């Protein structure tokens, strides 16, 4: 699918110079002289190299067509993940690195969205939020009840995050899978 240079957005996958690139950052630049352009930070899907590229507003670039499929996580074996397609029950194995920084939040039975290009998986994403148990946290300090105060906690998956003072060890909390940030106490 062809798009103009000013229509590029973070998260897009572009087919540029014969390779697949994921767009990470964009900065729209309007210099004093000349036409406007987008300064785009790209990351190569194959080898992970990053590069900056300028796309003029009227430039035409190729946006890759991606197919998204829902899978259920079954188990991990070494650095590979076993997933099952929820409609056809077909099982596949993917490298764990496709999940990225969200990997610690991957739990058995969780739905995983797999993006593929021409039949080859290029990325896997978890739901935006996950429910985890607080394994360890500091006790509440008397007088520390201000709404903006948080205390450090370690979750059952080993991820460290900041939680409100009212959250204790053993409680279930909802966190964002992208960065592990606390969202709310889980409803039982």
Image: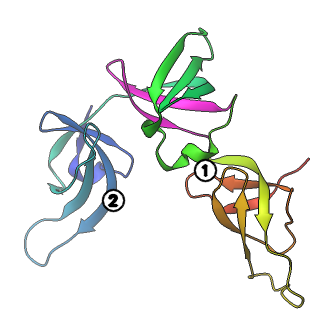
Q: Quadrant of the N terminus?
A: top left
Q: Which residue is mark 2?
A: 25
Coordinates of residue 184 in the picture (x, y in percent) = 78, 60
SS type, badge 1: loop
Q: What secondary structure do most residues of the magenta stretch adopt?
A: strand
Q: Which mark is residue 110?
A: none
Q: Nearer the viewer, mark 2 or mark 1?
A: 1
Coordinates of residue 81 in the picture (x, y in percent) = 52, 28
| 108 sits to left or right of 147 | left
Q: Which residue is mark 1?
A: 177
Residue 13 falls in image quadrant: top left
| 146 sits to left or right of 86 | right
Residue at position x 7%, y 69% in the image: 34
Of residues 161 and 52, the one nearer the viewer is 161
Question: What is the crowding at mark 2: few (fewer than 14 residues within 10 Å), some, or many (at least 20)?
Answer: some
Residue at position x 30%, y 49% in the image: 7
- Residue 105 is a magenta residue: no
SS type, badge 2: strand
Spot the residue most to the bottom. 143
| 162 sits to left or right of 59 | right
Magenta stretch in the rendered image: 109-127
């Amino acid at each position: 699918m062809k798009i103009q240079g000013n229509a590029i957005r973070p998260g897009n996958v572009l087919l540029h110079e014969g390779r697949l690139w994921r767009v990470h950052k964009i900065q729209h630049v309007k210099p004093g002289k000349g036409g406007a352009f987008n300064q785009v930070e790209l990351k190569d899907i194959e080898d992970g190299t990053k590069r900056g590229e300028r796309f003029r507003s009227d430039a035409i670039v190729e946006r890759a067509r991606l197919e998204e499929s829902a899978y259920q996580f079954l188990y991990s074996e070494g650095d590979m993940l076993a997933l099952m397609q929820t409609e056809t029950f077909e099982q596949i194995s993917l490298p764990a690195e496709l999940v990225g920084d969200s990997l610690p939040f991957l739990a058995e039975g969780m739905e995983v969205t797999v993006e593929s290009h021409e039949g080859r998986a290029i990325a896997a994403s978890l739901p935006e939020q996950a429910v985890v148990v607080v394994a360890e946290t500091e006790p509440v300090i008397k007088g520390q009840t201000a709404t903006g105060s948080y205390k450090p906690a370690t979750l059952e998956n080993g991820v460290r995050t900041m939680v409100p003072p009212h959250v204790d060890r053993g409680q279930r909390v909802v966190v964002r899978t992208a960065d592990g940030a606390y969202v709310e106490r889980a409803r039982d």
